[in-house]
Amino acid sequence: MPKVSNKYSFPLNAITTVAQLNDQLDLLESEAMKQIAVSKDPESLESLRVGFFGKKGRLSGILGSMGKLPGNERPLIGQRANLLKTELQKLITKKLEELTTAELNNQLAREAIDVTAPSSGVPFGHRHPLITTTENIVDLFCGLGYSVAEGPEIETDHYNFAALNIPEAHPARDMQDTFYLGGNLLLRTHTSPVQIRYLENNPPPVRIVAPGRVYRRDAVDATHSPVFHQVEVLAIDEGLNFSHLRGTVLAFLKAFFGELPVRFRASYFPFTEPSAEVDVQWRGRWLEVMGCGMVDPAVLEGLGLDPERWSGFAAGLGVERFCMVRHGVDDIRRLYTSDLRFLEQF
Ligand code: DAH
């Protein structure tokens, strides 16, 4: 038997005694335990496993040279080798669990969310200035005892024109001014038809405001839009006269604008008599903000109401104008272009 000078480096096929194989197993055991203990990740652990127990690993090498032992000594080495394998497998499994848990903990720590950190803020929407203006107007009239009524945006010739005493030849009926939808239908050009619809179903006394969208065939410019908004006002009772109209309008304008100069100008509308337009002074000029007047007896008669008993006043307010004056907006188009840089100011 050759003498072995260095038990760590001699070739395995030269080993033939139980003692030498036991030394080899001792060596494998201590190396494996050390390397498993310092292993940093599952991959290096796996290559350790292959290196020690794989088909071509060190344990196979040791077992391979077992054949050179006398038959009665082989089980000693075989049993020890099996025990060692089981023990090291356990160590590897345990280490693998440790590494996986540590990696998971690391990941959780890296991705942790600090629920106490201040928020970066969520952008909130808010109501459009035309809507808030409409609501302000409606609220002020509600404070005077009015209720809210609404009507359809698609109207018939009857409600939009005929019932409001607007004659066949009136320019408002022109194709150039009104969006006709075919048949008898059109897009309402004002909120005044709500007066008729309401009075058909509600006997006086009535006090209502009717906000809504209206349509006209106007080209778009700084003060015109084919779609805009009005609030209709209607009060019918016994004994109402022009001073009630004037007092109501002045009280409302003062509440809405504060102390702006106001003037009434004589005007004409087919459904009111007498009629007026109301201007407020804004940026050194008079700006018309509403039409109004005493409801024409012909309108009341058309509804089967006795004009000798009932009288009242009506007004139509241009919401865009109120909004522009209140907020200092000089171009109506800004109210429709949905530019957030503009809208966020309100
Ligand atoms: N409907 C009219 C328009 O759109 C405005 C108006 C004027 C309404 C006088 C009224 C009123 O109720 O009495 O031009």
Image (spheres, grey):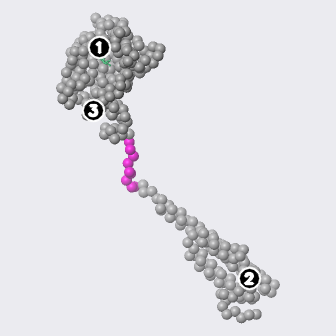
Q: Can you give x and y, in whole percent of width and height, for residue 135 in the image?
A: 33, 29
Assess whether residue 118 is covered by the magenta stretch: yes
Relative to 235, residue 37 above or below: below
Relative to 320, residue 25 above or below: below
Task: Report if the beta carbon of the residue with label 1 is closer than 8 angstroms to ligand 1.
Answer: yes
Q: Can you give x and y, in whole percent of width and height, for residue 16 in the image?
A: 75, 88
Query: Is 6 left or right of 277, judged from the image as shown?
Result: right
Q: Earlier in the sequence, mark 1 or mark 2?
A: 2
Q: Are marks 1 and 2 in contact (CB under 8 Å)?
A: no
| Callout 1: SS | strand
Amino acid at the residue labelled 3: Asp
User: Looking at the figure, which quarter contains the C terminus?
Assistant: top left
Residue that badge 3 annotates: 330
Q: Earlier in the sequence, mark 1 or mark 3?
A: 1
In this rendered view, identify the residue nearer to me: 171 or 247. Answer: 171
Disc marking residue 269: 1
